[in-house]
Amino acid sequence: MLYLNLKPVLEARQIVKPYSFLVKIGIAPHTAHKILNNDSHVMRLDNLNLICKALYCQPNDLLMFKQDPNVPVEKTHPLIKLIPAMEDNNWQQQLKTLPLDKLKQISQLLNQVETEE
């Protein structure tokens, strides 16, 4: 089953009030509540468009896949790539504690990535 996983992107953008954020960008309050509680079985494309524009991301950054035990999906199916990896996304805390020379290296790397696009 596909679902929206906004939490990592909201955290990366340092949005601490997700409900207020969604309502502010034009999502109806009732819909915002459903989205944040993963209770939304239907997603309007215009709402997805608003979210992606505001978070500066792609739908692939938000969509995740959770296997239904009653309806198995082959391990080679492309949806398997959307299963969230169990990884530590504590990069913001890591940035706060990095020495200045390491932060400069990261800055240089980011500049290289920007020029490649």
Image (cartoon, helix red, strand yellow):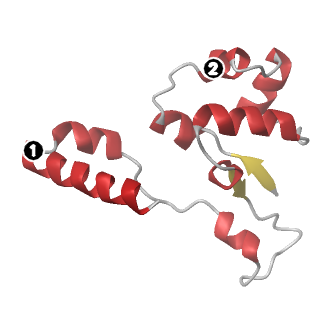
At horizontal 78% and vertical 39% (from top left) the residue drawn is 48
Q: For mark 1, give the secondary structure.
A: loop
**Circle 2 residue:** 21
**Real-space CA distance between mark 1 and mark 2, rounded to the nearest whole angstrom:** 33 Å
Looking at this view, is 5 or 46 the one in front? 46
Q: Quarter-wise, where is residue 1 in the image?
A: bottom right
Q: Residues within 10 Å of mark 2 (few under 14, many from 20)?
A: some
Looking at this view, is 50 or 99 the one in front? 50
Whole-percent x, y for residue 26 in the image: 77, 19
Asked whether the viewer can see residue 40, the reply is no
Relative height, residue 59 to residue 55 (above, below):
below
Q: Amino acid at mark 2?
A: Phe
Relative height, residue 49 to residue 80 (above, below):
above
**Circle 1 residue:** 99
Left-right relation of 91 to 49: left
Asked whether the viewer can see residue 5, the reply is yes
